[in-house]
Image: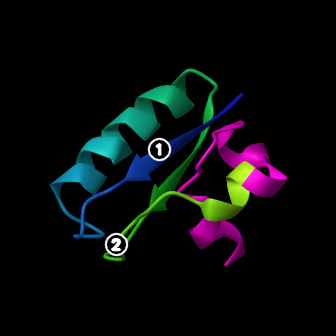
């Protein structure tokens, strides 16, 4: 199993990152692989392509209509 930890803070290595690293360490110690994804400082909005074509980033976050992650994964 793999878990994606999403850092929505505008500070890439701030307190949210530190907390996510603690969660990541605990999961890794229990045999769960993790990745930390930093959204960054960009404004997010719903994906307009997901409603028409389906979410192409579905492999990353599961099928989510209006996937905001898609912009960062493929665009």
Kindly identify which residue carries mark 2.
Answer: 43
* Residue at the image point whose x is 62% and y is 28% from the top: 32
Name the spot of residue 69 as percent of width and height, x first.
Answer: 56, 58
| Residue 10, placed above or below residue 31 | below
Q: Is residue 50 visible?
A: yes
11 vs 2, left or right, is: left
The furthest residue to the left: 15
Most foreground residue, 10 or 54? 54
- How many numbered circles are shown? 2
Name the spot of residue 60 as percent of width and height, x first.
Answer: 70, 48
Q: Is residue 56 visible?
A: no
Q: Is residue 50 magenta?
A: no
Q: Earlier in the sequence, mark 1 or mark 2?
A: 1
* Residue at the image point whose x is 43% and y is 37% from the top: 25
| Residue 42, placed above or below residue 30 | below
> Crowdedness of circle 2 by 10 Å Cα count: few (<14), some, many (20+)?
few
Foreground tag (1 vs 2): 2
């Amino acid at each position: 199993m793999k878990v994606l930890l999403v850092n929505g803070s505008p500070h890439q290595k701030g307190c949210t990152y530190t907390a996510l690293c603690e969660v990541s360490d605990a999961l890794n110690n229990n045999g769960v692989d993790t990745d930390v994804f930093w959204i960054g400082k960009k404004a997010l909005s719903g994906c307009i392509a997901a409603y028409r074509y389906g979410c192409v980033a579905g492999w990353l976050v599961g099928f989510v209509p209006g996937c905001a992650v898609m912009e960062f994964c493929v665009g």
